[in-house]
Image (spheres, rainbow, N blue to C red):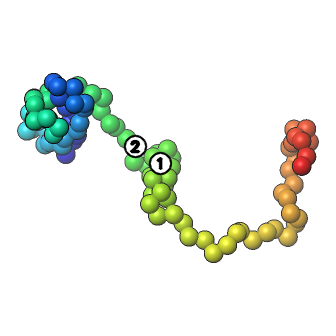
């Protein structure tokens, strides 16, 4: 069911309610003051379920609730303590 946005006439602020598209009322009672809240015209919330941005947002929200558990730091590479870069611009960076 789609979400519809309503705003109270007594400045309680906007709130959302879910209704079937065929049964959407023009106004509903405000949850804060029981006054009349009119339906607003708002932008649709369209999303692309398989886009990389949506996947990133989903994994970020999921990691807030279910952080990954690790046993320790990742293993070090046998080549050395720091990775070697071939980019000539990195030579200009300050050294520790």
- Residue at 34% of width from left, 37% of height from top? 46
Residue 4 % position (x, y): 21, 36
What is the quadrant of residue 26 in the picture? top left
Disc 1 from disc 2: Cα separation? 12 Å
Q: Quadrant of the N terminus?
A: top left
- Look at the numbered disc 1 and give the secondary structure of its residue: helix
- Residue 67 is situated, as x and y percent measured from the top left of the image, at 51, 63
Are discs 1 and 2 less than 8 Å apart at CB? Answer: no
Q: Which residue is mark 2?
A: 48
Residue 86 in picture, x, y percent from top left: 87, 48
Please tell me which residue is depicted at 19% across the width and 41% down the height of the picture: 17
**Mark 2 residue crowding within 10 angstroms, few (<14) / some (14–19) / many (20+):** few
SS of the residue at dot 2?
loop
The answer to whether residue 10 of the structure is visible from this angle is: yes
**Number of marks in the rendered image:** 2
User: Could you tell me residue 11's position as x and y percent?
Assistant: 22, 26
């Amino acid at each position: 069911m789609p979400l519809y946005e309503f705003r109270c006439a007594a400045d309680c602020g906007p709130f959302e309610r879910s209704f079937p598209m065929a049964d959407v009322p023009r106004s509903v009672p405000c949850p804060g003051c029981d006054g009349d809240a009119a339906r607003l015209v708002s932008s649709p919330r369209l999303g692309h379920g398989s886009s990389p941005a949506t996947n990133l947002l989903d994994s970020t929200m999921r990691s807030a609730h279910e952080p990954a558990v690790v046993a320790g730091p990742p293993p070090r590479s046998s080549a050395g303590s720091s990775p070697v870069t071939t980019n000539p611009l990195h030579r200009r960076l300050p050294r520790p």
